Image (cartoon, rainbow, N blue to C red):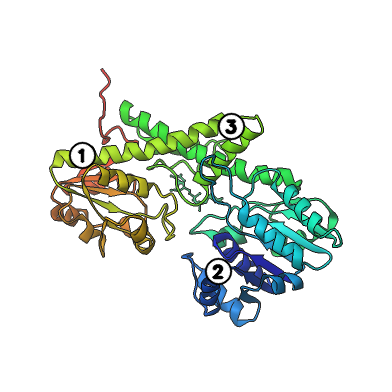
């Protein structure tokens, strides 16, 4: 069973490496020759814990290769995965399908009879059928099967998510497509991972509905955090207790500065746009998008207000990545927050353990610092925006001594009040009425 993986971005590279680890010959394809050259040299082009080891082993054992020659890779493949990007289209928020269409046209030209074509990229409902028709029109002479196989892996734990998913979702139209998926996912099957075999349309909607629901859950707890602050509650205690209800579940109830990343922002916008297009408005998700945007600005406003009160000219930002264990800054709340602080006329000094290289070009006027301690020097306010492990055990007394002001905004609720006691820091977390920004006493 030969696999061709088209697109060596996040999903494509992780999936390609993991399928090779399952024992299949995998050839990963990308049009970007520079990227393929780096991968062929054994360089891991994304930051993902554990990927380097798996990649090296499978290259060494001859199961994993990288090429720019799509036609040659596809011509040999029994199963062809398309895992190219589906960015947000400017203006309407719909997913831009130009890369999928280009990949599909190239696959159509090169595929062998009986090929199984699988779209792994996140695509809105109707896309798989449309791509199937496009390929069929281009190659009426060749039989093939269309499969939708959305991916649910999270950055930072992508390998674990691939190897131990809660479920695998496949949308199929025929027995050949279904059997091909059973074979490629056999190692998971043996571990009794449920495989949901459904239609193309259901698989597409499942992916968007899952991400939209999770983004909604995060947004919900963020609003509850606001209430906790105003009313003297504590969102962590509230989240813990509501999460014990199995119908709600404990995960994705951490209040913070708003969600970001390569999926939630883009997928919620696309889901909302799809709802409008099908005259089935997803008003809850429209609201989630708006509330999340507003939240980032509200967080920035808190920081600016506190900084002004300290009289210091600079703010230290710890964490730029949209979450820990990744160097990905796509739609990270930190980007909007940093820009808003700068717009208010303050200087931003920042540190991130992995994301500074990526951030340098998009945030040009930031003073990048070699450590968290260097970043806080002379700052009026410190804002902790990403919960990296490296920020979980900072010497808070030292931080207070290095700062010009003394406000610590812990926007990921990493610390507890007792951690900051006796440090001289004015500690403010998210969703804690005891230490929030404008706590109101109940009269
Ligand atoms: C997400 C989905 O989880 C994954 O299934 C899908 O395939 C791709 O999108 P990812 O973007 O890697 O994965 O990150 P995730 O861990 O889901 O976090 C997304 C954002 O929500 C981050 O900005 C994170 O900080 C935020 N978040 C998450 C919270 O603020 N609170 C939470 O409780 C959980």
CA–CA distance in space, label 1 to label 2: 46 Å
Q: Say if 93 sits above or below 1 in the image.
A: above
Residue 350 in percent (x, y) is at 27, 56
Quadrant of the image containing the N terminus: bottom right
**Element class at badge 1:** helix
Between discs 3 and 1, the one toward the N terminus: 3
Residue depicted at x 58% and y 37%: 273
Residue depicted at x 54% and y 61%: 10
Residue 61 in percent (x, y) is at 63, 81
**Residue identifier under label 1:** 306
Say left or right for 12 vs 129: left
**Element class at badge 2:** loop
**Residue identifier under label 2:** 32
**Pointer 3 with pointer 2, Cβ within 8 A:** no
**Residue identifier under label 3:** 282
Q: Say if 42 sits above or below 105 in the image.
A: below
**Element class at badge 3:** loop
């Amino acid at each position: 069973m030969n696999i061709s993986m088209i697109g060596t971005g996040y999903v494509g590279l992780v999936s390609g490496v993991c399928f090779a680890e399952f024992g299949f010959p995998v050839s990963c394809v990308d049009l970007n020759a520079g990227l393929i050259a780096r991968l062929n040299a054994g360089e891991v082009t994304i930051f993902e814990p554990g990927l380097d080891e798996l990649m090296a082993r499978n290259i060494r054992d001859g199961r994993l290769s990288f090429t720019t020659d799509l036609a040659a890779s596809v011509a040999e493949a029994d199963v062809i995965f398309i895992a190219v990007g589906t960015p947000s289209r400017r203006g309407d928020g719909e997913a831009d399908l130009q890369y999928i269409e280009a990949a599909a046209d190239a696959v159509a030209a090169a595929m062998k009879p009986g090929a199984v074509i699988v779209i792994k990229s996140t695509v809105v409902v109707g896309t798989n059928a449309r791509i199937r028709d496009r390929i069929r029109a281009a190659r009426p002479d060749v039989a093939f099967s269309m499969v939708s196989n959305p991916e649910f892996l999270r950055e930072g734990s992508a390998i674990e998510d691939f190897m131990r998913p809660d479920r695998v979702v496949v949308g199929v139209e025929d027995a050949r497509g279904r059997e091909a998926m059973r074979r490629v996912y056999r190692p998971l099957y043996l571990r009794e991972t449920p495989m949901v075999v459904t239609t193309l349309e259901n698989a597409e909607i499942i992916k968007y509905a899952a991400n939209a629901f999770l983004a909604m859950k995060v947004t919900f707890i963020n609003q509850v955090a606001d209430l906790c602050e105003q009313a003297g509650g504590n969102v962590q205690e509230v989240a813990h207790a509501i999460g014990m209800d199995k119908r709600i579940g404990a995960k994705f109830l951490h209040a913070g500065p708003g969600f970001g990343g390569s999926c939630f922002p883009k997928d919620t916008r696309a889901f909302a746009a799809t709802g409008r297009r099908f005259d089935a408005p997803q008003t809850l998700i429209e609201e989630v998008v708006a509330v999340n945007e507003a939240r980032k600005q509200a967080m920035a406003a808190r920081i600016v207000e506190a900084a002004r009160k300290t009289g210091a000219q600079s703010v230290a930002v710890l964490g730029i990545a949209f979450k820990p264990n990744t160097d990905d800054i796509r739609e990270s709340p930190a980007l909007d927050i940093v820009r808003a602080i700068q717009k208010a006329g303050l200087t931003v000094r920042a540190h991130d353990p992995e994301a500074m290289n990526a951030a340098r070009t998009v945030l040009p006027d930031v003073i990048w610092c070699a450590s968290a301690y260097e970043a806080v020097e002379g700052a009026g306010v410190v804002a902790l925006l990403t919960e990296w492990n490296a920020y979980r055990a900072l010497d808070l007394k030292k931080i207070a001594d290095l700062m010009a002001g003394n406000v610590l905004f812990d926007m990921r609720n990493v610390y507890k009040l007792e951690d900051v006691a006796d440090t001289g820091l004015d500690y403010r977390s998210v969703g804690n009425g005891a230490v929030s920004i404008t706590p109101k006493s109940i009269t």
